[in-house]
């Protein structure tokens, strides 16, 4: 499996100082590995709620915790699983297609998602058994 097919955490540029604050940048052809077609953000999710519970057939995503802390459990259907924590606004998580996800928000986290395609419910697999049987 090539690197691009696995999820990975990476650093975004961080410009500024403790005195004036910081700015981080997500930019196509520099640190986003696809053309961004959609941006959405998720917020006000209580700590005890688990979101996600789906996989995408084709969608690629880069996710940033612009505030707070977000825990990810990811799984592909070949028995690989991954745990990631996003808790700094200069970190990003790349999620390739074909990964079941469970997501927990802490500290009033705000999740920013940069996505490779427009919203399409047909791209979702929301049934775990169907996900396990799905051939990429
Ligand atoms: P979903 O992706 O299932 O969110 P989560 O995994 O965080 O719970 O989306 C929740 C709802 O929002 C679902 O009914 C679809 C809708 N939605 C859109 O209409 N457009 C979008 O771009 C997204 C991401 C979701």
Image (cartoon, rainbow, N blue to C red):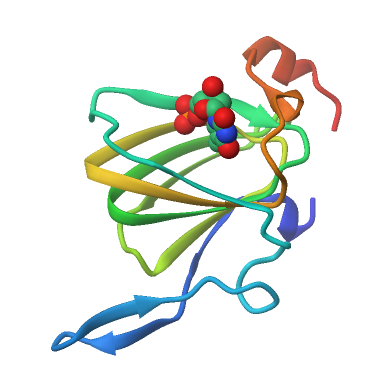
Q: Is residue 9 above or below residue 58?
A: below
Q: Is residue 3 above or below residue 128?
A: below
Is 103 on the left or on the right of 2, as rendered?
left
| Residue 20 picture location, percent across and down | 18, 87
Name the residue located 24 percent from the left edge and 40 percent from the top edge.
106
| Residue 87 picture location, percent across and down | 30, 56
Task: Using the rendered view, name the quadrant where residue 18 is placed.
Answer: bottom left
| Residue 124 picture location, percent across and down | 69, 26
* Residue 53 seen from this side: no
Residue found at the far left of this picture: 19
Is 91 on the left or on the right of 68, as rendered?
right
Is 66 on the left or on the right of 48, as rendered?
right
Name the residue located 71 percent from the left edge and 42 percent from the top edge.
59
Q: Is residue 58 above or below residue 38?
A: above
Q: Is residue 51 above or below residue 69?
A: above
Name the residue located 71 percent from the left edge and 35 percent from the top edge.
98
Q: Nearer the viewer, residue 123 or 128?
A: 123
Residue found at the far right of this picture: 135
* Residue 118 seen from this side: yes
Task: Using the rendered view, name the quadrant where residue 66 is placed.
Answer: bottom left
């Amino acid at each position: 499996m090539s690197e691009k097919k696995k999820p990975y955490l990476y650093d975004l540029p961080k410009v500024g100082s403790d005195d004036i604050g910081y700015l981080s940048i997500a930019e196509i052809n520099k640190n986003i590995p696809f053309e961004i077609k959609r941006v959405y953000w998720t917020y006000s999710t209580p700590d005890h709620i688990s979101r996600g519970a789906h996989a995408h057939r084709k969608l690629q995503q880069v996710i940033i915790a612009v505030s707070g802390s977000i825990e990810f459990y990811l799984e592909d259907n070949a028995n690989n699983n991954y745990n990631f924590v996003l808790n700094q606004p200069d970190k990003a998580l790349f999620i390739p297609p074909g990964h079941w996800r469970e997501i927990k928000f802490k500290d009033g986290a705000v999740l920013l998602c940069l996505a490779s395609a427009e919203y399409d419910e047909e791209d979702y697999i929301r049934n775990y058994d169907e996900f396990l049987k799905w051939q990429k």
